[in-house]
Image (cartoon, rainbow, N blue to C red):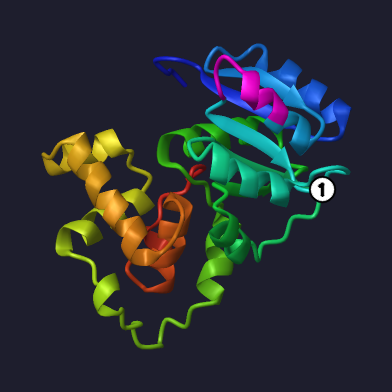
């Protein structure tokens, strides 16, 4: 995958072997650059204070001995909201939607995932702000009865036709630039609509927007574009 500049990532995991293996794997990748490594959330946050450049994405372990991934995520969202978070955990469960919505992480994946798959997920999160697998989508759709009436939104939540159009394109993994080109509007206009979507839906990021779109039957699970499809 070609990028104008490498995706800068951080690896935060209390298993030093995993940190070293991932660092070695990405060392041969010109599109992804490991710029920070830490074995604990508190150490990572301390590193960020003096870092000349903050990462675009952090690969974050959920269970760590000092500061765990949950607390680290909360502080990152407060202090460094531009950093996208991919939680990699051996305590993975497919019923992760509530966790993603509550904390605002951009992806939640099992630790046994292959490095090649992880690489594609990093690209997806960098481009669109989220990653969902087919398993994730199936888990979401199981919580929604397709025969149930479409939920009614409050006056504050009612989306305009343009916002609905942009929301559907977000779910189909179009980037902000691609949406602007497709709809013949400016990137700034797309960003404005996205900000309104976040405000109206009450979610924290694009991953939350996708979950909102499915739960409100704005888009069907079969209409989503998945990273490995």
Question: In the orientation shown, which residue stands out farthest toward the left?
Answer: 184
Residue visible at 85% across and 35% down in the picture: 14
* Residue 180 falls in image quadrant: top left
Q: Secondary structure at mark 1?
A: loop
In the visual, does 212 lie left or right of 150? right
Residue 128, relative to residue 26: is it above or below?
A: below
* Residue 49, horizontal then vertical, whole percent: 63, 25
Question: In the orientation shown, which residue stands out farthest toward the bottom?
Answer: 148
* Residue 64 falls in image quadrant: top right
Residue 92, relative to residue 185: is it above or below?
A: below
* Residue 137, horizontal then vertical, whole percent: 52, 61
Question: Can the viewer see residue 228?
Answer: yes
In the visual, does 66 lie left or right of 51? right
Of residues 44 and 79, the one nearer the viewer is 79
Chain part drawn in magenta: 46-54
Of residues 78 and 65, the one nearer the viewer is 78
In the visual, does 40 lie left or right of 189? right
Residue 203, relative to residue 59: is it above or below?
A: below
Of residues 12 and 218, the one nearer the viewer is 12
Q: How many marks?
A: 1
* Residue 117 falls in image quadrant: top right
Residue 73, relative to residue 138: is it above or below?
A: above
Residue visible at 55% across and 56% down in the picture: 134
Q: Is-magenta flag for residue 150?
A: no
Residue visible at 11% across and 39% down in the picture: 184
* Residue 88, horizontal then vertical, whole percent: 71, 43
Instruction: Check disc 1: other Cα within 10 Å, few if <14, some if 14-19, many if 20+.
Output: some
Q: Which residue is mark 1?
A: 63
Residue visible at 41% across and 50% down in the picture: 225
* Residue 78, horizontal then vertical, whole percent: 55, 45
């Amino acid at each position: 995958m070609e990028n104008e500049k490498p995706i800068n990532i951080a690896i935060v995991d209390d298993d030093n072997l995993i940190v070293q293996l991932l660092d070695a794997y990405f060392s041969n990748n010109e599109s992804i650059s490991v710029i920070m490594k830490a074995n604990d959330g508190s150490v990572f946050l301390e590193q960020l204070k003096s870092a000349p450049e903050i990462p675009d994405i952090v690969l974050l372990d959920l269970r760590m001995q000092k500061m765990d991934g949950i607390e680290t995520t909360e502080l990152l969202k407060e202090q460094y909201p531009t950093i996208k978070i991919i939680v990699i955990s051996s305590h993975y469960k497919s019923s992760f939607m509530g966790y993603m919505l509550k904390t605002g992480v951009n992806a939640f994946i099992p630790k046994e995932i292959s490095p090649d798959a992880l690489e594609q997920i990093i690209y997806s999160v960098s481009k669109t702000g989220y990653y969902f697998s087919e398993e994730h989508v199936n888990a979401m759709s199981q919580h929604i009865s397709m025969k149930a009436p479409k939920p009614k939104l409050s006056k504050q939540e009612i989306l305009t036709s343009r916002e609905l159009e942009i929301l559907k394109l977000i779910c189909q993994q179009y980037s902000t630039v691609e949406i602007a080109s497709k709809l013949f509007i400016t990137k700034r206009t797309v960003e404005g609509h996205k900000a309104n979507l976040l405000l109206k839906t009450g979610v924290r990021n694009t991953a939350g927007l996708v979950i909102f779109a499915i739960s409100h039957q704005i888009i069907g699970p079969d209409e989503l574009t998945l990273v490995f499809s």
